[in-house]
């Protein structure tokens, strides 16, 4: 392996470089899907400046309450510090109003 | 007229006790049958399936279901089906069922379906074994769906109950890049070849409720986040006529 004068490998990211936003989004989406406290695969994750935004629909209030802790734990593993903003909504599961005639 | 209640993607977990049942109170006054479009559980455990079935214990109309990808996640499909069956929910994945309801014969063909994509952006059974397995899974399920629908030759109303989408129109709202993981045109082709009055599916939480197959069969995405209610009710006339172009598509060439 060829190293530069400062001991780094050419092309390798310096150790202090934060995990890029693209990878953060991928890992957070995976965590939200895999962690049984949330378990939702369809949530949308976005990084805007210093804020990480999660939106989409979750099945109940307990899963919504778990969104921020799950994201913060995953961010901790990635060594990224972002303000987590939970914009998810709980699915409306009330009886329906009316019906549709299908032709 | 048959009144069909439908919902998918309820994603019951151990945290769902006493949360799902209230939405289904009085369903017997609104509908003749309840069709469940998969993803009934969060992670596919039999314990979650039991919670779901228990929550629907007071629903006295017939309950038919197919499984979704979440219901497969824990790889205990037989136990999930057993828990649902024990709780009074009949699973018709890969087969069909005829019910006498509202003085008419309702035929429902069930298929989980799978991905692959839509016109101009499809995967195919080419290359690595993993890619072939992916594409062939959809092809096999679509063929079986067509057979299950054709089998329903003595009913007044014929419905296809899926998890994955047969058309892109009911995915609108989802990111275009993931359409191939949300459904396949092969499912629509199967429906159009055999003919049906209605297709129900779930899976696409950010999608759109209304769509139609190229053959003219109404499609409804009943994923709970899409319909924003415990379930939706669709009424279908029982005069036996199929939608305009349905069943005029030649049998699938597989």
Image (spheres, grey):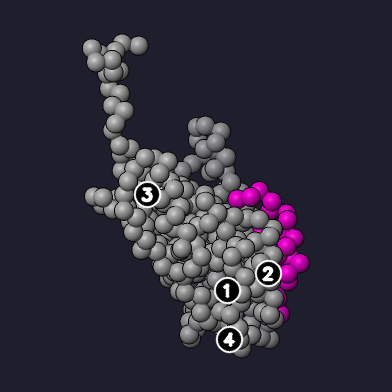
First of labels 2, 4 by sequence position = 4
First of labels 1, 3 by sequence position = 1
Are the residues under badges 4 and 3 in a single subunit? yes
Is disc 4 surrounded by few (<14), some (14 to 19) or many (20+) residues within 10 Å?
Answer: some
Q: Which residue is mark 4?
A: B30
Q: Which residue is mark 3?
A: B177
Q: Is residue B131 visible?
A: yes
Are the residues under badges 1 and 3 in a single subunit? yes
Q: Which residue is mark 2?
A: B53
Is disc 1 surrounded by few (<14), some (14 to 19) or many (20+) residues within 10 Å?
Answer: some
Range shown magenta: B73-100
Are the residues under badges 2 and 4 in a single subunit? yes
Exactly how many numbered labels are in the figure?
Answer: 4
Marks 1/2: CA–CA distance: 13 Å
Q: Position of residue B211 (x, y in %)?
A: 43, 68
Q: Is residue B152 visible?
A: no
Q: Position of residue A59 (x, y in %)?
A: 50, 66
């Amino acid at each position: 392996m060829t190293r530069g004068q400062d001991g780094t490998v050419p092309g390798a990211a310096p150790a202090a470089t934060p995990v890029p936003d693209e990878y953060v989004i991928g890992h957070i989406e995976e965590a939200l899907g895999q962690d049984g406290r949330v378990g939702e695969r369809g949530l949308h994750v976005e990084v805007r400046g210093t804020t990480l935004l999660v939106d989409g629909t979750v099945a109940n209030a307990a899963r919504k309450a778990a969104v921020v802790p799950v994201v913060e734990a995953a961010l901790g593993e990635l060594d990224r510090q972002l303000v987590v903003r939970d914009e998810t909504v709980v699915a409306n599961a009330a009886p329906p109003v009316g019906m549709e005639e299908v032709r | 007229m048959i009144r069909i209640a439908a919902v998918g993607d309820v994603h019951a977990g151990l945290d769902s006790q006493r949360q799902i049942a209230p939405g289904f109170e009085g369903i017997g006054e609104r509908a003749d049958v309840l069709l469940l479009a998969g993803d009934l559980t969060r992670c596919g455990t039999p314990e979650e399936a039991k919670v779901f079935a228990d929550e629907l214990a007071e629903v006295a109309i017939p309950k038919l279901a197919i499984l979704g990808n979440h219901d497969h996640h824990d790889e205990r499909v037989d136990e999930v089906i057993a828990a649902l069956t024990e709780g009074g929910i009949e699973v018709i994945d890969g087969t069909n069922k005829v019910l006498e309801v509202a003085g008419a014969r309702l035929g429902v063909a069930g298929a989980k379906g799978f991905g692959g994509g839509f016109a101009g952006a499809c995967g195919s059974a080419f290359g690595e074994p993993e890619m072939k397995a992916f594409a062939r899974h959809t092809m096999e399920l679509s063929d079986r769906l067509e057979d299950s629908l054709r089998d329903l030759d003595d009913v007044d109303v014929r419905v296809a109950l899926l998890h994955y989408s047969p058309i892109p129109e009911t995915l609108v709202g989802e990111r275009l890049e993931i359409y191939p993981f949300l459904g396949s045109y092969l499912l629509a082709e199967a429906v159009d070849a055999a003919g049906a009055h209605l297709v129900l599916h779930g899976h696409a939480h950010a999608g759109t409720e209304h769509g139609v197959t190229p053959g003219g069969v109404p499609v409804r995405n009943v994923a709970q986040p899409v319909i924003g209610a415990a379930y939706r009710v669709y009424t279908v006339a029982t005069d036996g006529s199929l939608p305009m172009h349905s069943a005029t598509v030649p049998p699938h060439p597989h």
